[in-house]
Image (tube, rainbow, N blue to C red):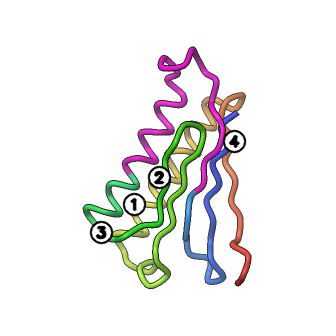
Amino acid sequence: MLEVVFYRDAHKRLSSIVARGHAQGGRYGKDIVCAAASAVLQAAWLGLEEHAGLRLDACSAPGTFSLRWPARSRDNAAVKAIVATAELAVREIARQYPKHVRVGRRTEKAG
């Protein structure tokens, strides 16, 4: 199961994305569900860096993915659009493939 969590800060703004696991929707390298979710998350990373010009705290490795963007950028319209679109797209993938993808929404812990 692939679990993708969209975190919000104390002001309810999207602040980070963490994905763990594998969708297991097919053989490794042939898993269209994992490929779809991965493409959405990689596009968000690219959009935040290249379009919005952000420096991210980011990690991508087999079975794990995380993106976190600076608090000062969270009210930026481009940032909001990029990450909200990523959340919508991953939620749609999870709706279509509920046995393979789970999406969560959590609030960051203060501190």
Q: Kindly report which numbered mark, 3 or 1, lies closer to the viewer in this rendering.
A: 3
Start-end of magenta stretch: 18-43
> Could you tell me which secondary element the residue under label 3 belongs to?
loop
Q: Which mark is residue 82?
A: 1
> Badge 1 local density, few (<14 within 10 Å), some, or many (20+)?
some
- Residue 55, how many percent across, how many down? 36, 70
Residue type of the residue flagged with mark 1: Ile
Q: CA distance from mark 3 to mark 1?
A: 9 Å
Q: According to the image, label 2 marks what residue?
A: 86
- Horizontal side, residue 53 vs residue 42: left or right: left
CA–CA distance in space, label 4 to label 2: 14 Å
Mark 2, secondary structure of its residue = helix
| Disc 2 and disc 1 in contact, CB within 8 angstroms | yes
Which residue lies under the disc numbered 4?
A: 102
Pointer 3 and pointer 1: residues touching (CB < 8 Å)? yes
Please tell me which residue is depicted at 60% across the width and 54% down the height of the picture: 18
| Residue at (58% x, 16% y) in the render | 26
Name the kind of residue labelled 4 in the image.
Answer: Arg
